[in-house]
Structures are given as structure tokens and as C-alpha cells.
Amino acid sequence: MLNKYRIAFSDPRARAFSFAGFIARMPISMVGIGILMYVETARGNYTLAGSVSALGAIAAAAGGPITSRLTDRFGQHRILPWQIVIVVSAAVALILTIPSDLPAIWIFVFAIISGFCSPSIGALVRARWTALLVSGPVLITAFSVESMIDEIIFVIGPSIAAFTSVNIHPAAPQSIAVVFLLVGGIWLISMRDTEPPINLHQVKHGKPVVFKNGLLWLVFVHFLAGVFFGSIETTMIAFSDFTGVPVAAGFLLALWSIGSLIGGIYYGASDFKLPLPNQLVLISLILIPPAAVVPFVDSLFWLGVVAVIAGFGIAPLLISAASIAQQRAGAGRTTEAIASMYSGIAVGFAFAAASAGWLIDNHGTSWAFSIGLGAAMAMMLAALAARPYLSKPPAP
């Protein structure tokens, strides 16, 4: 059952760039919760905290496809260093601005700069896998590994962020995230031999990849997935705070990711016969029952149980979607395609974080959790509507 995993990692170069990517994308699990807790601690307002997180995510969504298109055109070693320099500078400015007397507008400015220039490390690593393995079931397994790494990150990261924010300093999660990006990013840049080849003509003269082969439908599915993730995660943090155990937020998010990790391991090792678009529909359906239960949960224990169950469908959803995107993107466009999917998630997460923050402040956590149910139902319907378009043979 695990033979495909051994094949995928038989090349030592794959082990190296995958581990470097693991380190470099640790910040994705720490920055959101870190900013939320830091702004709320320093400024005392969940609406402001959610809005800052939302604008940062929107900026990342806008910048991701642009910087990834540049990366496909010029190479990772030329674009990634500039992204790291800008993001680290903006992150330091954000750390200093949040507790200061400066107007809140400056918090938004630095969050936007940091978000817009943030590298899509997951897309960069998956592009390297595509160059190494080209296609086939082992590539799907490699994508499964990367999704499992994402989940491990989301097990470790929120716990580190919550613990260090409460016990060391509210700015600690942001500071640690900067170190992770520097170490992992520089290591990834140094591995020139696994960079995907540049397809200069297609990237320079072709239209944005999301307008090809039904990928816009896939972006919309990711947007709804982002709404689902953002509403549940933001409300989990507030639920923990309202019950008097704020540090539990990190553990709840870790349980959510453990469920996803288990689902990802099973999905990556299995050999499903259904076409990928059909798998996407069925996986979306799995998320609806736990989303229907969570608004009625009234204890941290039961919220943790539901989080594990809901998490089981997350990694398979993202793995199947990334595999579809890779198949339909065309040569030399994998980074841009997968980054565009991430942008859909980021916009959805931003919308949900702001909406859930307002509902939490004005109506409580049950109403905020209800956003997740609506998103799960809409995501299943969108995946069903997208199936005919994603099942057609892709145009070159």
C-alpha cells in the first residue's frame, strides 16, 4: 500500500526540496492565527483582527498568481529571493506597528505588502515534483505527500503560535515565522538542479492559466473551500477564548489538521478508479455532515471531536484538486495554476474571517460556525457543476 510513497522519495533530491519546502511554508500555519491573536491582544477588537487577516489573505490571493507567473517565466532562483526580502521586511514592520500608537491603517498597509509578495511555496514545490515525475499515479502520491506536509504544518504551527503568543510574547509567532521562511527559502533557492524548466513562450504570450480548460471552476471550488476553512478556524479561536481557555485554539486547529493528515495518508496510498472530477464531488459531500453539527457544539471536547471528523476530507479535497489543476494547466504552467487555486482559498478565507469576526462580535460563535455549513453545501454543488468541464480532454 505504501510502495508508491517509497517510489516517490527514491530520489534524494526529492527528499531535499520537499523538506526545504516544509520549513519554508511553516509560516502559512502561524501567520494567520498569530496576527489574529496579536492584534486582538494589542488593540482589543476581533473585527479589526479579522479584517487585518482578511486583507492580508486577499493581498496574497492577488499576488500569488502574478508572482507565480513570473516564476514560471524567469525561474524560481530569480524571483523567490526578492519575495523573501520584501516579505521579511514587511513582517518586521508589522510586528513593530501592531502594538504602537500608529493608526490602524499602517497595520493594513504592511499586512497587504507582506501578503501580496508572499511566495507560494507549496506551488513551487509541487512544480518541482511535476518536473521530476512528469505525471501518473506516483505524481498524485507526491502531491498527497505535500498535502500531508501541509497538514503536519497545520498541526505544529497553530500550537506553536498559540503557545508562544500566550506564554512568550504576542509577537513571537510572527518572529518565528520569519526565521522559518528565511531558512527554508534560502535552502530551496540553492537547489537549482530540481527547478522546473522555463516555458518562456507559453508563459509570456499565453493568457492566464485560470481561463484554460475549466480551471476557473476549480478556482471557485477553492474559494468555497477557503470560506469553509476560514469560518471554522476563526470561530474555533473565538470559541476557545470565550470558554476561558485561549491556548486551546492551537490544539483545536491541530486536531482539525490531524483528521486531514489521516485522510491524506489514506487517499495518497489508495488507488481509486473514479475519475478525479468525480472524486472531487464525493469528497466535497463528506464535509457537509460535520459542518451541520458544529454550530450546535457547546464544549471544547466535542468541538475537538467534530474537528477531527471534518478534517478527514480536507487533504483528499486539496490533493484531488491539485492533481486536476496539474493535468489541465499545460507545460510550464504548474506553479501559476496551483498558486491560482491557493488564491481562491485565500479569498474565501479572507471573506470568511471578516464575516465570522463580525458575527462573533455581534451574534456569537454559533452563527459564525453556520458560515461553514453554507460553504460546504455550496462547494459540493460547485464541484458537481464543474464536473463536465473538468472531464473534457484538456486543450494544449
Image (tube, helix red, strand yellow):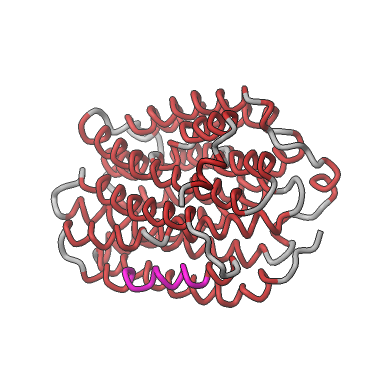
- From the viewer's perspective, tell me whether residue 227 is left or right of residue 200: left
For residue 316: magenta? no
In front here: 230 or 136?
136
Q: Position of residue 308 (x, y in %)?
A: 29, 58
Q: Position of residue 316 (x, y in %)?
A: 47, 59
Q: Position of residue 89 (x, y in %)?
A: 51, 26
Using the rendered image of the protein, determine whether residue 59 is visible from the camera's viewpoint: no
Main SS type for the magenta part? Answer: helix
Using the rendered image of the protein, determine whether residue 207 is visible from the camera's viewpoint: yes
Residue at 21% of width from left, 47% of height from top? 248
Q: Residue 86 appears in which quarter of the rendering?
A: top right
Q: Position of residue 319 (x, y in %)?
A: 52, 55
Which image quarter holds the C terminus? bottom right
In front here: 315 or 137?
137
Number of labels in the image equals: 0
Residue at 28% of width from left, 33% of height from top? 170
- From the viewer's perspective, tell me whether residue 392 is left or right of residue 298: right
In front here: 55 or 284?
284
Residue at 79% of width from left, 46% of height from top? 203
- From the viewer's perspective, tell me whether residue 219 is left or right of residue 44: right
Look at the picture and state if 225 lies above or below 53.
below
Looking at the rendering, the stretch of residues picked out in magenta corresponds to 281-291
Residue at 54% of width from left, 29% of height from top? 16
